[in-house]
Amino acid sequence: MDKVDLRALIIATADTIVAHAEELTALDQAIGDGDHGLNMKRGFEAVRTEADAFAAKPLPEALKAIGTKLVMTVGGASGPLFGTLFMALGKEISAEPDRANLAAAFGKAIEAVAARGKSQAGQKTMLDVLQPVHEALFQGKTAAEITDVAGRAADATVPMKALRGRASFLGDRSIGHMDPGARSVALLMRAVAETIEGH
């Protein structure tokens, strides 16, 4: 990934989250405390503002810096979780990753998110999208296929009962609503996949 690609990725992911902030807020109002969309928008706007500075760094350093910025600006429970995803990915990825390195680094990043959130797949969280995306990456799926996997995985959180996070307080009432964190991950994956395919 050259610098143009990295900058394009940063802009695309930030713009996608900002564009879907109201949808994410509505999802969170149903089963959370209603601030997910606003928090994510604030964090990714902050990242977008520094896109040039991040893109000038080697990929591992850029990801770590983006993760740190998200922790500092997103707030709520999502800040540490999304920040951890980027920081752990930056720690594990090489400067010019091939698919094998990317898949391995992504796997380690998911483990870090699970440890930070004390959760696992199946509990109606962002992990329910991250895990299937990792498997798709590992299996050599195309960007379009990975986007499809992420979207379907987010949809699959609707009938689930939340066992972690604010939504878990609702018990059975959390059933029938998509997890906002899962939707956020699906949106990010689509932005990344479409940008990479575009290049």
Image (cartoon, grey):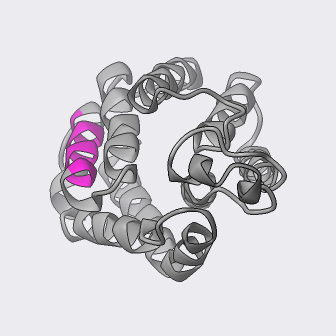
Residue 18 visible in image: yes
- Foreground: 162 or 69? 162
User: In this rendering, is residue 1 above or below 89?
Assistant: below
Residue nearest the observer in this picture, 176 or 53: 176
Query: Residue 83: horizontal and vertical position, in percent?
Result: 32, 43
64 drawn magenta: yes
Residue span colored magenta: 61-71
* Depth check, front residue: 29 or 44: 29
Residue 126 in picture, x, y percent from top left: 58, 44
Give the camera-side residue of 23 and 88.
23
- Rendered location of residue 94, percent (x, y): 36, 22
Extreme residue toward the left, this view: 53
* Quadrant for the N terminus in the image: top left
Secondary structure mostly taken by the magenta-highlighted segment of the chain: helix
The residue positioned 79% from the left and 46% from the top of the image is: 160
- Left or right: where does residue 13 sit relative to residue 71? right
Q: Residue at x 59, y 77 (%)?
A: 26
Coordinates of residue 170 in the picture (x, y in percent)? 64, 55
